[in-house]
Amino acid sequence: MDFPPGTINPAKRNEDALSFLATRRSRPPKMLAAPAPDRAALREILEIAARVPDHGKLEPWRFVVLEKAALDRLAEEAAVFAATHNLPEDKAAKGVNQFAQSPLCVALIAVPRPTDKVPQIEQTLSVGAAGMQLVNAALAAGWGASWLTGWVALDERFTGPAFGLKAGEWVAGLIHIGTEAHQPPERPRPNMDAITTWVEA
């Protein structure tokens, strides 16, 4: 059967997937509660997260899973770090609360691979794809999830020892996952006409 130009066979259109992507919404740690996914459930999510564009099959990312005891420890370490380095109180609290409020967190670690064939920017984009895939996989599995950074992900003085980073590695994000305790309101979305250019010839 032929279909009009610009359309696709309706049998190949995944309405459930499109509806999910059109309505997906992150849930920050303060809106999450226990339980979090167990290791078997999280492994499924991580396997999906790793199914992303990866030029050269370099796997320029890895995952550090932070369970509740580890998060409590990191909250204490973050508080000590903030006090030692005289961070502003509000800034310090945001970092500490990321760990204290989260039932489970996956630190997405960028692992740049030395190669002349795949530019670093492509590797970084693959890391970003893994982060987005991780969040969406968790949401699709019925959990609440969000991708955050902040100083606890960006300050190398803290992240190196906190996450056991090796030379050249850096934290791309902290993906918090748990049971949705509160539903956030919808937020403004981009004006598609303002950010889209159609090139006809």
Image: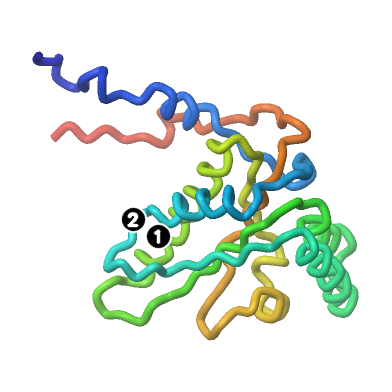
Q: Nearer the viewer, residue 73 or 122?
A: 73
35 to the left or right of 88: left
Q: Which mark is residue 33?
A: none
Q: How was this image coloured?
A: rainbow
> Residue at 52% across / 42% down in the picture?
136
If the image is split into quadrants, where does the C terminus sit? top left
Image quadrant where residue 73 sits? bottom right
What amino acid type should be assigned to the residue bearing mark 2?
A: Pro
10 to the left or right of 109: left
Q: Which mark is residue 53?
A: 2
The residue carrying pointer 2 sits among few (fewer than 14), some (14 to 19) or many (20 or more) residues within 10 Å by Cα, namely: some
Return the x and y of residue 66 as percentages of the image width and height. 69, 63
Return the x and y of residue 80 as percentages of the image width and height. 88, 75
Return the x and y of residue 124 as percentages of the image width and height. 43, 65
The residue carrying pointer 1 sits among few (fewer than 14), some (14 to 19) or many (20 or more) residues within 10 Å by Cα, namely: many
Q: Which residue is mark 1?
A: 126
Residues marked 1 and 2 touching at CB (< 8 Å)? yes
